Amino acid sequence: MSCDLTHSVLHGYLDGELDAARAAEFERHLLSCPQCVSALEAQEMLRTSIQRADLYERAPESLRLKTEFASPIPAVTPIRTKTQRFEMRWLAAAAVLLAAFLAWHFIPALDGNRGQNEIASAIVDAHLRSLQPGHLEDVVSTDQHTVKPWFDGKLDFAPPVRDFADAGFPLQGGRLDIVEGKTVAVLVYGRRKHLINVFIWPSAEPDAAPRSGTRLGYNWVEWTKNGMKMWTVSDVSAPELDALRNLIRN
């Protein structure tokens, strides 16, 4: 049985057509609706695989010139034979099968071969959504012993929760979020008047050195430690973000 929101809201959310409040409402709905999560994953995977298929071929310049200077030809509706109609239907069916094959063949997992830039884009987008009123924290507390138990029963893993107020990064709370259709834990830290989101989910990857970058003016750092994938993102400077990473790793 499918959820009504799968048809009425999901495509608008996927295409970025919802306002911030409606997007946040749908994301909260995703936390308790596996049907919508499954449908969202399938749509994202299909779109990504088609984009990666490189099916576009640029027309040669000579064709453009011929088109610009050619005399207009009256449009004539072709009369297709039965054989031609059969061939068109076969081609349409083949196109559907090709799209399905591409979706299956090129689907990467969250920790698989998906391009790092795509995940960074999703992380920064989630960070921006969290800055909308009422969406930053589900549990508001500076006490790690309050934030950590809040995740119990809401996730199938236990995110590491620590307060670094003595080092200038006070814990402010936590929440659940959605990254590429996956439910993840997010810890929120402060740095003077800035906010830092730390996204956490389980990973089968071995421990890896940090990688960093910038998107839309926001710095991010990503690494894997003790079976956990972690991403930090904020508008603080890159050295400050790296300082928080070192605190979390130690």
Image: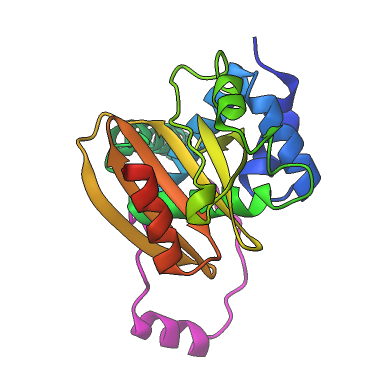
Does residue 139 sit above or below 163 in this rendering?
A: above
Return the residue nearer the eye: 197 or 16.
197
**Picture coordinates of residue 45, whole percent (x, y):** 44, 37
Question: Residue at the spot x=46%, y=51% of the render?
Answer: 232
Q: Dominant secondary structure of the magenta stretch?
A: loop
Question: Residue at the spot x=35%, y=85% of the render?
Answer: 62
**Picture coordinates of residue 90, whole percent (x, y):** 40, 33
Q: How many marks?
A: 0
Does residue 236 sit above or below 186 in this rendering?
A: below
- Residue 240 lies in quadrant: bottom left
Q: How is the image coloured?
A: rainbow
Furthest residue in direction front, as rendered: 166
Relative to 79, is 240 on the left or the right?
left
**Picture coordinates of residue 249, whole percent (x, y):** 32, 43
Relative to 61, is 155 on the left or the right?
right
Residue 182 in sight here: no
Q: Is residue 154 magenta?
A: no
Furthest residue in direction top, as rendered: 1
Q: Which residues are magenta?
A: 52-80
Question: Residue at the spot x=28%, y=34% of the render?
Answer: 105
**Picture coordinates of residue 217, whole percent (x, y):** 53, 70
Question: Residue at the spot x=57%, y=20% of the render?
Answer: 149
Does residue 171 sit above or below 51 in this rendering?
A: above
Relative to 161, is 224 on the left or the right?
left
* Quadrant containing the C terminus in the rendered view: top left
Return the residue nearer the eye: 126 or 193.
193
Q: Is residue 70 magenta?
A: yes
Return the residue nearer the eye: 62 or 85.
62
- Residue 59 lies in quadrant: bottom left
Residue 168 in sight here: yes
* Quadrant containing the N terminus in the rendered view: top right
